Structures are given as structure tokens and as C-alpha cells.
Amino acid sequence: MAERCAVVGVGMTKMSKCRDDVSMAGLVREAAMRALEDAEMTWADVQAVVIGTAPDIFEGVMMPELYLADALGATGKPIMRVHTAGSVGGSTAVVATHLIESQVHERVLTVAFEKQSEGDTNFAFSSGRSGGVGAGGYFAPHIRAYIERSGAPAYVGPMVAVKDRKNALKNPYAHLRIPDITIEMVMESPFVWDPIHRLESCPTSDGACAMVLTNEAGASRATKPPAWVHGTAVRTELGWFPGRDPVNPKGGQDCAADVYRQAGVTDPRADFDVVECYVPFSWYEPMWMENLGFADVGDGWKLTESGATSMDGDIPVNCSGGVLSSNPIGASGMLRFAEAAQQVRGLAGDHQIADARRALGHAYGGAAQYFSMWVVAAEKP
Amino acid sequence: MATTWKLEFPYRRSVGPVIGAFLTGLRDRRVVGVRTAGGRVLVPPFEYDPDTGEPASDLVEVGSAGVIEHGAWVGTPLRTHPLDRPFAWALVRLDGADTALLHALDCGSAAGAEPGARVRIRWRTETVGHVSDIECFEPE
Amino acid sequence: MTDPVQFMSHHTAVEYSLPEPSRLGVHFAVQLGRGKIIGHRCPQCAKVYVPPRGYCPLCVVETTDADEVSIADRGTITTFSVITPLQYPGQQETEDYVQATLLLDGSDTTLMVTGLEGIAIADVRTGLRVEAVWAPDGERGAAAVGVRGMGLGDAVKGWRPTGEPDLPREQLAEHVL
Amino acid sequence: MTRDVAIVAFAQAPLDQAPGQTETLMLLPTITDALNTVGLTRRDVDFTCSGSADYLTGGTFTFVQMLEAAGAWPPISESHVEMDGAWALYEAWVRLQHGDVDVALVFSSGRASASASLRETLTFQLDPYYLAPIGADYVSLAALQGQAVLERTGRTDKDLAQIVVQRRHDAIANPHAAVSGDVSVDELLRNDYVVEPLRTHDVGPAVDGAAAVVLVAGERARQICDRPAWIAGLDHRVDPHYPGVRDLAQSKSAALAAARAGVGNGGVEVAELCAVCTPEELVLTEALGLGDAVTINPSGGALVANPVMVTGLVRIGEAFRQVHDHGRQRVLGHASSGPCLQQNLVCVLEARD
């Protein structure tokens, strides 16, 4: 039977438009060394490394795990590179969890990063061909379909944009800092991909995130509180086929059902204290709240509108500021997983939810077709 | 009708303190390495000991000439190679370094790329802080 | 004394061959040249794919010439977005334009189309009925078709409203993509 | 400690593909074939993992299209590594250790022919500050490794040619070989150098490829396959990246992976090595501790066909065939990645009667 797995170290870099003070190795090491320090471990304690990043063309380095292997202390150890589009940071953590749960290793370092300032994200998305519309151009029609279907008022997306940017002010690692942001300001910002306003979109960031995972014995020795992994799941579906519903994808529903079953979650809104959810465009908060079972289909926007997802609501979402405030794409999913872990460890700092016991980390990618999730809790499963 | 397409992009890389020190040195026609905690001098330098992952930041200057460890003669250079005439790739341990630097060696024939031969850096006329400030190695 | 080096340029250029057109891609392009749109109907689930891909990704079976069907050159906009082009090396678009998802009559799959004609951007809407504006005979650049296999190349210059009543949104719910 | 997992099926796309064949359509029948041989369908698969690399074709998220060959509706539990498919097999093997699921599908694909110059494309794998900007390429680096191993062992390019003669002879029976036939050492030594000491025959011809492997855990493997190849050991290790910081004539990472995979515990009869350039065979044979009695690369190995991103998975597939089709008891499949054999994976397969 599977071994238990816990997070005993978390490290994040300061995220910004351009981390012009570090190399790629420097960036991933900044996160990794913080995670090791948090775990009170050294490079020698790590038995295996699992790294994730999004498309190689972002940085112009093919399979960067080769160049980064020794920077991550992996000499003489196994290193793997996961890539599942935007969900990669999450699925990378899931692979690392599997290495512990399967008893293949006892201490695993997992890292995810993106250094988007090296290149140009929209160039990369289009492989340099003309006519590229970026991720927003792809998702905008889905968002329009959601708004039309649910009848949500136009200000709900902007509410999310304001909430997450205000939350980011409490997170020292967050990229965007817009202290005076208001709903009016968001709604007056230009459309980049109608119906998405500029201020409803994620930035492109440089940044990295790392976690140290260990087994039950290792977690018992940790001096800081561990975050116990109660479930992990990944799901993938075709991105394009007749009859597909990209607004409420079945892959997301199935993934949530799987991870809830493992963790014994039956009523997500009641059972979770906090959620870190992959929201690169503001309207994805209500969309995913429905997809993940926190609200009935068509009612997700009411959750946001009521304030339930704000830090003082009953189901706070993205207290860290989320993807809307910091988006080093390859790391964005792992940041959600790591922030969920920090909440249940009680180590989330100024954006800590008091007495958070159970949290959901969520990531998605591709054409809203790749999903990875984990449930972490303060109590041992 | 086109049968090929080109993926072309000018990446702009921030280099951080250690690679930065090396490139700054090249711009000034000096070679800067880094000493690891174990005492090994790495040229080119890394921010870490490749064997252990431990940080390395103790910058040291090394010589601009050294000894060939291994060489491989390239009779037909690729478009992307440093020299457009036949040359050798050479792993060169510069004086004072414990590791070898890879670059092109302009040595006329395969015989010039034998292990143990001494070579020195030929600097580019204009140096900008790039690994190509080293135009190539040449026999000392 | 000058500042330490903080950046380096790494100019990359790598060349790839364009994929050869497949036999099916050539056939599709030739039909477009004649002003005809064809698709493949999956022998198992009966879904119609335009352009034909030679397989049904749902049933994971290959499709053949025997599964070919003709498709109308008119259809319905199922959703859309107004794009303000992002600028990056290689981008040639500069002006705002509509990118629409189009469901052709007789097809189960949608096409991402641009080039809406005879309608203001502000009037574009879900449910709008449109028809193809074909390039003149002989200018339907069949060669441009098939590289990525997802569109109609330059055989169709654009799309214009037919003037028919809009289709109700509910009928399009399954065709957001 | 570990759960018993076996390879029960392996299929490889034919070398000759129709013009314009997409990777998806190379994979679709290959995956179907692999599953069909053991009476499974895509619906029976509990976990899917694939390997591929965007840069081979210059795309972004190219692996997403391959889902259409995997059968990803209804949604599947799935992962992807931007690595050779051998590492996808590793991830799938780890997933099967949990005990809650039994059947995994592994596949990988690559279109090396899309690159105008594979050497230039694979240069993107190298250190982006020190190596890629000077255009170092995988053949040049393999040549430096070749010099190192020839100097260390006292062998010559004649010894390299002798290896190629054997591989090409063995490849006559392999329909997936891009080059095969009986040649003499003297003939080969008339070939041009690419980068000394590597002549044209010392660099495995890059080809387009796709392959699929089916893994099944426990008793079920025995039920659906008459002679499964059980994974007796599976491990992978990496060396430092920069070629000037390590001894290129040896491979510590391959030796470590072999030790961890238990190659020494009973030895192996056959080894399928992912040696894309001839000298790599010399380095690997020593690092993996393969004595003279071990048959190396009966398929011809990577020197007769290098379907980039698939080559390692094919080695494991060929090792499976040695157990399943040829009655071998204990064999080794090896995969490698990166410059100068930087990363190595060792898979020991055995028959259990």
C-alpha cells in the first residue's frame, strides 16, 4: 500500500516581470534553497529531483533539466522533467508525490519555474507565426460563453481581479502590486480580448517554486509543521471535439471527484478552509468554482459576488494573489499547490487564513483540458 | 513554394553574478573562474559545485592559456559553428583551472588538437561580454 | 571602469521543413479549389469532421475516402472574441479584428475564422448566420492549406452575414469550440 | 518492496510512412497494435504517460495533439515528460507501484526529419550561456567523448568500425532499421569523418518514429500475456551537464543506474543500449559492467536507427522482445539523454516461469 507523503519545505522566489539579477540556474536555486532551508535539509539529503516548466521555446532551452541538473544538486541522482502545459507545476508536484508514495524515494525535491523575460510568451505560443492571439485570445470565447450562459453581471470578473490584486499586497513574493485597484479601474482598462479587460488578465512573470516532499517518518522528524498530502489526481481530455464543453470541462469535474474521494471530501465548500485555484483570467474563478463543485452550475459568480471567496469569506480563494498577480507559467501550478500547503502549515504569513486545516491546490492547462489537483491538510491522513 | 520555415528569436538572458563575472572578465580580456568549497577552480564558472550543488561564489582569475584535454577535428563546420573553416573543438584546462573550457581551436589540422598541447585564447577585436569574445583558441 | 555584464544576447535561428501535405490534405485543398468543402463522417459515432483528419479522435479510429461528405459553405457563429493583436516578432496583425468560432451546416466541428465582412465589429454576435466569401476561381491558393490542417487556407477570403434569422443560443451550447 | 510490474506488449510504427503523415497518425495504429496484442482496448488503460520534445518540430505544446491517438475522451489519468519515452515508462512504473491501478500505456514519438539540421536543433539542449551560443552540437560533443574513450582504452576508429559492421549485420533482421547490410571494416573506413573520430557510419541515422509499450501489474500480466517481461530493476541517474567538468571516457551515472537496477545481481544475457554514436557503446559497456558474454544490441541498436525521443523506449521494447519472443531470461534495456550520455536509464527485464 502507498506510503504517506508530506510537504516539509516550501520555497518561492520573488516574482517580477524580469528577474534581471539571476540566471535561470540562479532562479531555480533561489526557490530550491529556500525549500531546503525550510525543510532543514541540505542538497545531500535530496534523493531525486522532479522539475516542471512550460514550453521550452519560452526560454529557448530544449529540455532545460539537462542544463539545470547539477544546478539542482541532481548529480548522481534521478531527475525528471514533466510537461503538461499550464498545469505542469501541479502535475510535477503530483509526480514527486508519487515517488514518495510508491516508496521509491524518501526525500524528493520538486521545482517548477519560468523565466519568461528571456523570450516572448506570445512569440512562443505562435511559434513565431503571424496571427497569434495568445492564451487570452483562446480563452476569451469560452469566457463569453460562460457569461452568456450564466447571466453573470459584468462586474463579477472585475471583482475577482480586484480581490486577487488586493490579496497580492499581503504576499511579499507576488509580482503585480496595484494598491489602489478598483472595479471601475478594471472595467475602464482596455479590452485585450473582449470580454477580457487588461486588468482581468494575468501578467507574464519570472519566478520559481520548490517543495521538499518526504514520507511519514521524515515528516515526523520535521520541526516545522508538515502539510500532509491527502490526495492527488490528474485528468486530461481532448482539447477539441464536437460537443466538448470547455466552460465546464468534464476532466476538471472528474479530477476533483477523484481527489475528493481520496481525501474524504464530500462537501467542498464546507470541507475546505481555503483554495488556491488556477485563475489566469478573472472569470475563471466563478467558472472553476462550479467545475470543482463549490457552487451549482450557473451559480459560481454568486459565490464571488457574495464575497465568499475573499479572505474574510467562508471559502477564501487565492489569498496569495493567485495567477492574476504572478504568472511564471511553468511554476504557476506549483505555486497553487505550495500556497495550499503553506496555509495548512500555518506558514502563509500575512495572507494566512486563521486555523486553515484543509486546502485544495488546483492547476489547469492547454485548452482547459489538463487538470492536476491535490488536497493537503494539517492532520495526518 | 517555401519548403522550410525558420524559428528565430533574439533571447536576452540575464546572467546573474557568477556567469556575469565571467562575461565581464571576457569583456576585459581576462578569464574569471570560481573556486568551490572543496577547492576546485571551475572555468567556466558556475554558481554551484557541479558535484554537490553547494553554492560557489569565490571568484578567481586564471590564465588565458592552457592545455588541451581532448580535441576533435571538424573538417566540415556547420553554419552555427564559431569558425567557418576547418577547426577542432577543444576542451582546454586553462592555467590555474581544474576543469576544461570548450571552444573552437584554430589549429590548421587534426594534429594540432592532440591532448597535452598548449593553446591560448585568441580574443575577438571587439569584446562585449559574451562567450564569443573568445574568438577561438590558437596554438601557443 | 564599466558596469558588470548583466545580460547577454542569444540570437537563435533554427530551420524546419514544412510538413509535406498528406494525400488527404491535398484532396481537401483540391476540393476547396473547386469551391467545395468536404468532411469525414466517423463510421462509428457519425460525427462529421471539417477539415477531415483521417481519424475520429473520439472513437480513435481511422476514417477514409468512403467516409467523405459534402458540407455547406454557410453556418453559424457560436462564439467570438474581439482581438487587439499582441505584438511580437513575426506578428503581422495590427488592427482589432473579430475571431469567431464557426459551425458550418452539416459539420459537427467548428472552425476558428476571421475576416468577417459587411458587419461592424460591434454587431457580431453568437447565433449570427454567415456564408463564405470565396476567393476568385484560380486564386484559392490550395497550397496554403493543410500545414496545420485546421482551416480553409485562403480559399475562403472571409465570411458575410446571410441575413437569415439568428440561431438561438441554446442550439449552439455544444459548439463553443 | 516494489510491486511486480511487467511489460506485456510493445509496438513500433513502421519506418516507411506515407508523405505528410502526422505524428498523431503514426501513433494511433501503433498504440492500437500494442493494446490489441494482449486483448486490451484504450478503455482498459488506467494511466497513460508519453514522452516527446517540442523543439524537434519547432512547435509549442506539440504533445497535446498526440492525445488524439491516446484516446482522451472520456478524460483519462495522464502525464507527459519532455524526455525520451523511456522516462515516461519510468513515471508509469512509479504510478503502478501505488497498487490501486494495474494497466499503464506508455508511448512516445518524434519527427527528427522536421529539422533542417538535427545537430543545430539539438544544440538548444545545451547550456544557454556557454555552449549553445558557440554552436556546440551533439555530434561534436560525442566526438570529444569518442576521443576521450579511444585515448583511455587505446582503441582506434577501426574498432569503432568493427562495432558498426556487427550492428548493421544484425539490423538485417530488423524492419525498423534505417541502415543495414553486410559491410567490411575497410569499406567503412573509407567513409568521411563527420567530426573526428566519428565517421558518417558512427552517427545513428535520425529517423521519424513512434512506439508504444503496455505495462501491467501483478497477476493480470500473466493472465493476458504468455511470457511477460517483468521489471526486475529500473533506475536513472544524471551527470553534470558541462562536458569539461567530468571524465568523458566514463559514465558514472550509467554505472550508478546499473547498480541501482541490480544489473550485477545475476547479470544479463542481452543489452539494448541507447548509443547514438559508436564510442558511446564502449563507455556504456564498461559502465554497465557488461562482459564479453553479453549480446549487445541484437536489433542493431541506435546506430541503425535513431528515432529521437523514442530511441530509448525502443531499446526497452527490444529488450522486451528478447524475453517475450526469443526466450531470454534476463535482459537490459538502456536509454540516454543529453550531451555525452549525460543522463542514463537502466531497465532490467526478466522472465519468471
Image (cartoon, rainbow, N blue to C red):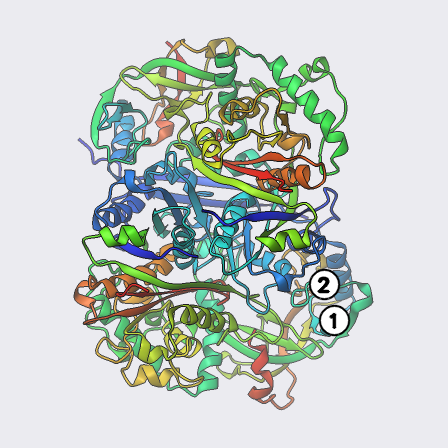
Q: Which residue is mark 1?
A: C44
* Camera-side residue of D200 and D218: D218
Of residues C73 and D41, the one drawn nearer to the viewer in this rendering: D41
- The subunit letter for the residue under badge 2 reads C
* Dots 1, 2 in contact, CB < 8 A: yes
User: Within the image, what quadrant is residue D174 found in?
Assistant: top right
Horizontal and vertical percent position of residue D102? 56, 57
Q: Quadrant of residue D182?
A: top right
Q: Earlier in the sequence, mark 1 or mark 2?
A: 1
Q: Residue at x 66, y 79 (%)?
A: C75
Residue type, mark 1 in image = Gln
Chain hosting mark 1: C
Q: Which mark is residue C61?
A: 2
Say what secondary structure mark 1 lies in.
Answer: loop
The tag on residue D278 is: none
Residue extending farthest front? D353
Q: In the image, residue C106 lies at what x, y percent?
A: 71, 78
The secondary element bearing badge 2 is classed as strand
Q: Quadrant of the N terminus of chain C?
A: top left
Residue D130, placed above or below residue C103: above
